[in-house]
Amino acid sequence: MNLQSTKKLANGVDMPILGLGVYKMTDPQETVEAITKALDVGYRAIDTAALYYNEEQVGEAIRHSGVRREDIFVTTKVWNADQGYDNTLRAFEVSLKKLGMDYVDLYLTHWPVEGKYADTYRAIERLYEEKLIRVPGVSNHHAPHLQEVMKMAQIPPMVNQIEAHPYLSQEPLRAFCAEQGIAVTAWSPLGRGGVLQDETIVKIGEKYGKSAAQVVLRWHIQNDILVIPKSVTPARIEENANIFDFELSTEEMVKINGLNRNQRFGKNPDNFHFDF
Ligand code: NAD
């Protein structure tokens, strides 16, 4: 495995196992610099969303990177206020324009908005049929949400992006997704930094000369979870990608799996309210 390694999704598309998350990158120049740095280091996936208000910078950084568009995997998401069938199609057009691209690799329903998310996914399915996206997917969907979506869909979602880290290992949902052939991406893979002081993790890192962040990212990957850690700090962007020269033992994997306490740093998909 290396930074260019991919996971084969249900339709055969290869998705890089590690990408850069760009949530809360609000300063345009800082955002372009962070993405440029990541692509220089060898990242080949960028995770954005309409909500992040930085799709323009994602497009700009990619166009100026010298890396071919087709060699980069771009994910974006339809925000809650834009859900429903027609609205999603319109929101996608806006995202595409902001990105300055003629297709997106992966398009996701950002959250399962009650009464709308099944129609939102039907629109995503249409975008897939029209070849405007290479992979249809969802985010923050629990098993009942996925079941509801799959009742209506001809083509099941191929990716579910969910909060996951050592304090929220999501084993039952991951098992459900695996049964359905849905790949899982971890958002907040580092628990927004909240798991990095954990003694067990730090200690394991000391053995390999690796930071807690590197141990956690490696743990995800060995659990077959795709990761999109966020950082604007060049040294951390490099550090987070430097996880392919060591391997956690089965015993260490079990130890980190055992840290689960179902603790969320973000909202619960069964009970979320956003004011925007
Ligand atoms: P994260 O777990 O990636 O943590 C990011 C924070 O951890 C950074 O702000 C930084 O403070 C710290 N950090 C990063 N690398 C570090 C290192 N090597 N050492 C020490 N500290 C380090 O959290 P996130 O940004 O919430 O999640 C990552 C990405 O997931 C986002 O940027 C976004 O793309 C995506 N996301 C999606 C959803 C969703 O609803 N689908 C929600 C939240 C985030």
Image (tube, rainbow, N blue to C red):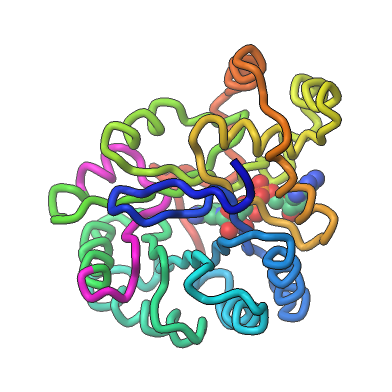
Q: Is residue 125 left or right of residue 112?
A: left
* Residue at the image point whose x is 26% and y is 37% from the top: 180
Q: Nearer the viewer, residue 150 or 249?
A: 249
- Can the viewer see residue 67? yes
Give the total number of marks visible in the rendering.
Answer: 0
Q: Is residue 240 left or right of residue 82?
A: right
In the rendered image, residue 85, in percent from the top left (x then y), is placed at: 23, 71
* Residue at the image point whose x is 53% and y is 67% from the top: 72
Residue 172 vs 266, above or below: the answer is above
- Can the viewer see residue 276? no
Q: Residue furthest top?
A: 251
* Residue at the image point whose x is 66% and y is 41% from the top: 191
Let me know if residue 132 is in the magenta part.
Answer: yes
**Dividing the image into 4 quarters, which one contains the N terminus?**
top right
What is the span of residues highlighted in magenta in the rendered image? 129-148
Q: Quadrant of residue 142?
A: top left
In the rendered image, residue 158, in percent from the top left (x then y), is placed at: 32, 50
Let me know if residue 140 is in the magenta part.
Answer: yes
Q: Quadrant of residue 145?
A: top left
Residue 107 vs 197, above or below: the answer is below
In the rendered image, residue 186, in percent from the top left (x then y), is placed at: 53, 44
Q: Nearer the viewer, residue 49 or 271?
A: 49
* Residue at the image point whose x is 52% and y is 68% from the top: 71
In the rendered image, residue 81, in percent from the top left (x then y), is placed at: 39, 70
Q: Nearer the viewer, residue 157 or 66?
A: 66
